[in-house]
Image (cartoon, helix red, strand yellow):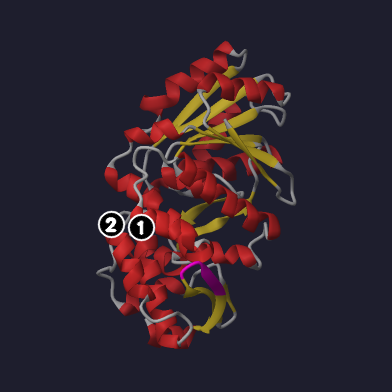
Amino acid sequence: MKTINIKASSGAYNVYIGVDYKSIVDTIKKSGKRGKAFVVSDTTVFPLYGGGIVGALVDGGFDTASYTISAGEEHKRLSTIESLYEAFHQHGMTRTDVIIALGGGVVGDMTGFAAGTYLRGVSYIQIPTTLLAQIDSSVGGKTGVDTAYGKNLVGLFNQPAAVFIDPTVLKTLSPQIFADGMAEAIKYGLIKDAKLYNRILYGEFSEDVTELIDTCVSIKNAVVSADERDRGERMLLNFGHTLGHAIEKCGNFKKYTHGQAVAIGMVYAASIGENLGVTAPGTTDDIIQILKKYALPIRSDESKEQIYSALLSDKKKSGDTINFVLLKSIGDAMIYPIDVLELKKLL
């Protein structure tokens, strides 16, 4: 088992890579947790792994309950959070108990938000089951829900007590969902690690992704440790996300998966960077090449006007500018404020 210590300013915690249900429960108990546990999962993941984790918790002496939400980004809403609050109340959850997120990024984001706001804060643990969640969304403490106005516009920073990653669960993912995670891995290579980018371009990770998970989590740890609240360097992790989130919104969070939208967003951001003279010529073509390897999309059907309208509600908008992330070259990114009117011309 590999352990990475995340050094967040609000409290350090460990990411454990290569674990099973029993070792997860043993580690939770060693942390001093007793009493009640509540597992939040979705209709895709719970039938596969819910019984295993619930059974391990019961065997470990926890009074355990679970709640299954409908799978899909379109259910990442405040109405679902309200249902979670009711379920927590019915199980008699207190601040000394533990809430467990078992699933992908949507489950993790909502569980972290619900845990952080119920009783003004109940400890929660992440057990991510998709590649995207394992290398990105489960680490760093960003939680929240979508609104009709945009993605993740309601939320809070709430670091988990621990993250447990079992790479073997990824074998049940469809090729499309696995590719979603690879979009985020490619992002890490593009913004911070040209060697990682080349390993992804020329290597094959579908059978053994442990090294990839380790590398990506280590990169995120370094960034989050330096800027937990997303006011500086952490913004670099948003490469492709500003446009990607807008594209997701245009598709009502149904047309594109998160990874697909980010892939398109990275292509568009690289093109904007080249047009501004910031990004090295040919970078856009390089990104298109690596995205095609994983059958990820490189363009959307949405009009310039649709994307621009969705961009105006982006969280990184400050006054009349948006803090855009652009590449200088592969492995080297920068924050580049762009006036919103100029951005409309660049799209």
- The residue identified by callout 1 is 201
Task: Say if 233 sits above or below 253 in the image.
Answer: below
Q: Which residue type carries mark 2?
A: Lys
Q: Which residue type carries mark 1?
A: Leu
Structural distance between the alpha carbons of marks 1 and 2: 8 Å
Q: Quadrant of residue 227?
A: bottom right
Task: Please tell me whether mark 2 sits on a helix, a strand or a loop.
Answer: helix
- The residue identified by callout 2 is 293
Q: Name which of mark 1 and mark 2 comes first in the sequence.
A: 1
| Range of magenta residues | 330-334
Which of the pair 221/318 is nearer the observer?
221
Residue located 55% across and 56% down the image:
154
Task: Say if 32 sits above or below 338 in the image.
Answer: above
- Verify whether residue 46 appears in magenta: no
Magenta-colored segment: predominant secondary structure: strand
Q: Which mark is residue 328?
A: none
Give x and y (percent) for residue 108: 51, 42
Which of the pair 96/279 is nearer the observer?
279
Tag count in the figure?
A: 2
The residue carrying pointer 1 sits among few (fewer than 14), some (14 to 19) or many (20 or more) residues within 10 Å by Cα, namely some
